[in-house]
Amino acid sequence: MPHKTRRHDYKSHIIEEYYITEEPFYLPLKDEVALFEAAYAERIPVLLKGPTGCGKTRFLEYMTYRMSQKEHKRKGSNAQRDGIPLITIACHEDLTASDLVGKYLLEGDTTRWVDGPLTRAVKSGGICYLDEVVEARKDTIVLIHPLADHRRSLYIEKKGEMLEASDSFILVISYNPGYQSILKNLKHSTRQRFIAIEFTHPPRSIETKIIAHEAGVDDDTAGRLAQLGEKIRNLKEQDLSEVISTRLLIYAARMIRQGIPARRACEVAAVWSITDDAEVQKSLKEVVTAIFE
Amino acid sequence: MSRANDQIKQPEPETVNNYHGIEFASIEPLLQVYCRALTGKEVDFTSAKGPPASLRNTWWNQLASGDPPDGHINVLIPASFMEYTSYADNFSWYKSVVTQQIAHSEFDSFNFDFDKESTIFEDLRYQLKGETGHGSSPFAKYFALFDDPRLAMQVFVAVENVRINYLAKYHYPGLRRSYRRMQEYNLLALARLSGITLRRAFIELLEGLEIDAILAIDEEALYEPLNGAKDVLDMLCTSTADVEDSAEAAIRIYQIALTVPKKALASGAGGYGSESREPNASDLEGQEFMGNFQTDKIKLDLEIKAHTGQKSTMPMSAEDMQKLADQKVGITDIKDVKSLPGSGLSSASIPRGVHVYQFSNDKYTQVDRYRPTDATKPAPAEADERLSFYDEWDFRENRYIGSWCCVREKTLGEGSSYFYDKTLETRRPLVAEIKRQFERLPAEMLYKAKNLEDGDEFDLDLVIGELVDKRAGHTPTGKVYTRKKKIQRDVAVAFLLDMSGSTADLINKNHPTMQYEESFKYDFMKFVMQPRRRIIDLEKESIVLLCHAIETLGDNYGIYGFSGHGRSNVQFLVIKDLNESFGERIKRRVDQIAPIHGTRMGPAIRHTISRLDACGNTLKLLFLVSDGYPQDSLYGYDDDDKEYAIHDTKMALIEASQKNIIPFCLTVDSAGNDYLRTMCNDIGYEVLDDIETLPHRLPMLYKKLSM
């Protein structure tokens, strides 16, 4: 009898070959699409600011897709490699310069240089997205300075090389000003190399459409969840350090779609996820029970 | 507008010994956050003196007195409520009342724009007098359009209430049921009005039309106008209606109201019209709006005074309303729908057999807590006692009551060391195991410092990185060493032992009292004398094992028991003091650990905090071992005020954290999860399902916490 093997349906991409081939769903809130297009045309680095789960990453995926489509049109080719790859680097406090730029590895008696993701992005001409950039150590962040001004170059100290960025390369960084401490703030010398696009939570009407589309629930349920989001966001600062994201509202909607009663879905996805304070949880549950039957 | 299909529910009779009333103070913090969430504004709650039905007009009162909410919303709310027999119903009533009041802010009752067009009705505002109104505010301009501005104002307030009630239920469907119940409650309160005009009754009944409810009134002249008003209100009740739409609806209903005669309502119908005499004009006009209006504060710049030449007498006084509410009259003579010609209402919308119950602000008998009587004054200290006074946290008042509790500290008397030695002997295997575990705890702990140029050992990762760089032609940094640094163990721990009366409860699990054995049949004494241990016995055993174990570590530890009776007699018994060396006397004191009385945890914890705070140790732990929730004589507003006691204990534990003392609660009460979740918000706790595990678990928990 033949062995039944488990089917693996994952996809693996080399980072400079990760292209957005299908248009991501994104509803513009203001003029951010036009701003990004203008910045990209001028190759000005972009800083995306906004609370967690408000759509920064989705926006960048959407813009990468749009920019790729333009590239295809310009080159008259639909080949994937003529698009623009999106290279995402999640920053954290142990991220070293070597992790970004590259390092030597031992290979027998010799060493071999391996490019880091930043170097690969610079070479391949992708959109390099440094997510939560303030989490990275300050000595690491200064690495991107020459890439983020008129020089558009990366200095690889260990190789003694100066790498000029490919024409389609652009640097995009993101951070959430809400939960940054004084110790972890972006240096002015860094932030003044970027234009900043601010994101907020979408208004109720748009958030309703987003929830309905992403979770596949009816407009009424999506509207109630957006209403809940709006109400919980009224508690910013005083009662909650971080308010509910659109992402969590979508999760709640998905739970509802799977048959979990709305009140319970909101409890697990909206109330317990955002606070551990028992008193605030109680109050939020009252808001949930007022909005959902 | 939804059609009602249920009758007003008759309140169930109140059970005497089952109190479910709510003091608003106990739910105020919860509703404060709820209101902030709904409106995004700060809400100030003010205690209301008038009847609850009048609260629906609070918004108008604020607007009329020139104090519309800006940054803050003022919500009037009774201090206590107990109309319904369940806590949930009473809470829902509070929630609905609060929602109704803040909804005026959320749905913009205050932001009337005279020039903004209605989206539902054709604008009649500009046609009424053929010109725009005069006045300094949009409302003043609006009311100046009417020949009888006072009537217009009454109609407008009722219509706007209808809009708000509809929108509140539309946007908060989860509240519909309780909100409607509140509306019915208000409608029934209206039935208490006596001696009013037919026109007044017409206006008062408008709000009921939104829920298709009407009080039976034996006045045919009312039904045609009510039917007309219902058509207008049906149009108004949409999710997009705004205050300008209410203003237009009010113009139309005002015109209908003018057709209703101003004669007195006939007596004997429902609760209306208690007097048969023909009322004079001042009676009729003086009995005005349902609600606690402040007549002398109207600052709307209206032209009423000029028109009527009399004082603007908007409201019925709060005293009158209270009098009416206190009548406690049941409405039973409800007419059949067929006798309500042209009402357009179904029989189902008519309340049948309903009763209105008296409302009182202070039904919940409160102890005058802040004026201590002689009985609560602490007795003078005995020779071996030390008295200390501590504050107590009143969560309802949201404040500390200064020097409220008297802690009487004394050293526990000495018995025999038999119990101590016997426990070590009978529990020998467990003693050996705990000792083994504790001996593994190093007296000093080590941590590893990295990236050093000099140290005890190489860090292999760093060395490889350096070698690779060297191979690639780079200069190594040399920072490849690690060094172990010592942290001296410096622990002070206080064990606080619950010695309340409930610890005398027997543990039946492994020793069922009626367990049948053949031998018992012939030996009754053997049955009586079979070993049955109490909770306190297990606590004592645990303490013995703990002392034995901690002695091997050399930590600074204290063991204290607490109990007492009332706030002036919190007993704090020293079994082993911090810094006191262990010896025969301690063994003999352990023998004397016994159940005493209540469990006033707050002051006992605070006293322990003061002891620990005086220690110079780096790590300080407070271990609370109890068998149930805190409870003591008048620990709160009565003897069974569990919520108060839990909140005071919670605050005491928070105080410990603030002084860098790590508190931990261990309970053997299997129902402990319910209250410990509240009591120990961010504080560690454990509930032991099997009390028999206490002697083993307590030393292990200590080991874990002191690392």
Image (cartoon, coloured by chain):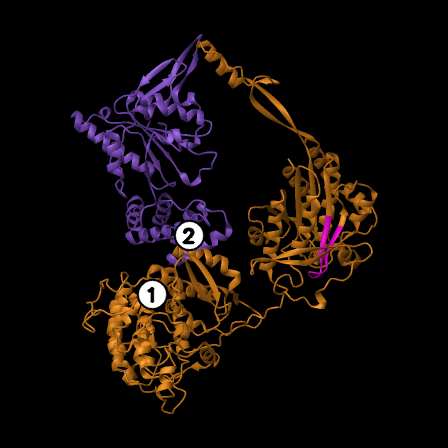
Chain colours: A purple, B orange
| Amino acid at pointer 1 | Ile
Structural crowding at the residue carrying mark 2, measured as other residues with C-alpha within 10 Å and reported as few (<14), some (14–19) or many (≥20): some
Q: In the picture shown, does residue A281 fall above or below B224?
A: above
How many circles with numbers are drawn on the protein?
2
Residue B481 percent coordinates (x, y): 57, 18
Question: In this rendering, does residue B697 appear at all?
Answer: no
Q: In the picture shown, does residue B157 fall above or below A147?
A: below
Q: Which residue is mark 1?
A: B164
Marks 1 & 2 on one chain? no
Residue B561 highlighted magenta (yes or no): yes
Residue A134 percent coordinates (x, y): 42, 32
Q: Which image quadrant: the C terminus of chain B?
A: top right
Left or right: A277, with B429 as reference point: left
Q: Which residue is mark 2?
A: A264
Main SS, magenta residues: strand
Q: Which image quadrant: the N terminus of chain B?
A: bottom left
Left or right: B314, with B470 as reference point: left
Q: Residues in magenta? A: B560-573
Left or right: B223, with A280 as reference point: left
Question: In this rendering, does residue B196 appear at all?
Answer: yes
